[in-house]
Amino acid sequence: MKLSDFDFELPSNLIAQSPVYPRDTSKMLVIDQNNFADQRFFDLPNYITKNDLVICNNTKVIASRLEGRRNNTSIQITLHKKNNNDTWHAFAKPAKKLKTNDELKFNSLNAKIIDKLEMGEIIIKFNCNNDELLNKLSEIGTMPLPPYIKRNEPNEYDDNLNYQTVFAKNLGAVAAPTAGLHFTNEILKTLIKSKINIDYVTLHVGAGTFLPVKSEDINNHKMHSEWGEVSNQVVEKIIACRRNGGKIISIGTTTLRILETAFNASTGILKPFAGHTNVFIKPGYNFNSTDILLTNFHLPKSTLLMLVYAFGGIENIKSAYKYAIENKYRFFSYGDCCLIRKSNE
């Protein structure tokens, strides 16, 4: 398939600029083989049984956007990936005049540019260790909202709260696992009261998830790498769920991607995993870990949309997105969600 196969017209007024409150009142489109049902997220427990297993991504978003200066010039950077040698990949604006060895100042933080890459990306090293950096980021950094969310006022909404899931635990993401944003503590309690099993994986979502696909031949696209972990406990629960005839519900494309990474297609065995993944899921992919996917509505020409096409069936998802647009569903990170049963295609 070509990149143009994943394009669609989206009215700009359907791009969600703010969260809904309460979170669980967001709309949820249930997609089951060309059958669509308009629901609210608080209806989710009605679609899950006690034999099923719900798996969420418990990554926690770092306040990774920094405002600072290079000499007398203002600069903004967004950290998006930590390297093994305590350097960081970051996107810089403006980046054109930046050079290797330039010094950057961000209030109490200083950094040096180690390398300058393409598309506004730089590699930098801070003047402190990683633990100190994370503490300082929580004080002076801001949430790395995606570029399609525009703020009239910096504190118009409490993004430090709203752009974080209620089960966020493991600090390391620079973008939220947005399907999880719909959950409230009340929904979690309802699921637990119904004896529905819930467990967690970690995938530290990178800002590369927002990078556009440049190649018309999607097979030439190189996925960004992200760190994730699937514990032995989760593996054992998935095996037990399958044995009992239950379904695996992945909350978000990030959860699905790390579960698929942990599954060895050649041996047919799911094993615990910890490390980096750059798995690229597109139509034709054979899913092994998940039966039902909860996810938001994604950008045209994005790898996330390609994954959803692969999971739900191309024509099925095209019809669902057309239906969502006609019925004023809100798109992208702060938008509404859909519950998709895996296609038999």
Image: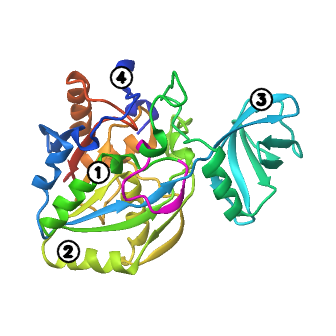
Are the residues at dot 2 and dot 1 in contact (C-beta closer than 8 Å)?
no
Sequence-wise, which precedes: disc 4 or disc 1? 4
Which residue is at 26% across, 29% downward? Answer: 329
Q: Report crowding for label 2: few under 14, some 14 to 19, many 20 or more residues within 10 A (C-alpha).
A: some
Task: Indicate the amino acid at tag 4.
Answer: Leu
The image quarter in which residue 317 lies: top left
State how far apart marks 4 and 1 are (Cα).
26 Å
For label 2, the residue is 241
Sequence-wise, which precedes: disc 4 or disc 3? 4
Q: Report crowding for label 4: few under 14, some 14 to 19, many 20 or more residues within 10 A (C-alpha).
A: some
State how far apart marks 2 and 1 are (Cα).
22 Å
Which residue is at 17% across, 40% downward? Answer: 40
State how far apart marks 4 and 3 are (Cα).
34 Å
In the picture, the quarter occupied by the N terminus is top left
Residue 74's disc number? 3
Q: Report crowding for label 3: few under 14, some 14 to 19, many 20 or more residues within 10 A (C-alpha).
A: few
Are the residues at dot 4 and dot 2 in contact (C-beta closer than 8 Å)?
no
Which residue is at 52% across, 58% downward? Answer: 278
For label 1, the residue is 183
For label 4, the residue is 10
Sequence-wise, which precedes: disc 3 or disc 2? 3
Residue 79 visible (yes or no)? no
Task: Indicate the amino acid at tag 2.
Answer: Cys
- Stretch in magenta: 162-174
Sequence-wise, which precedes: disc 2 or disc 1? 1
Question: Is 169 included in the stretch rendered in magenta?
Answer: yes
State how far apart marks 1 and 3 are (Cα).
38 Å
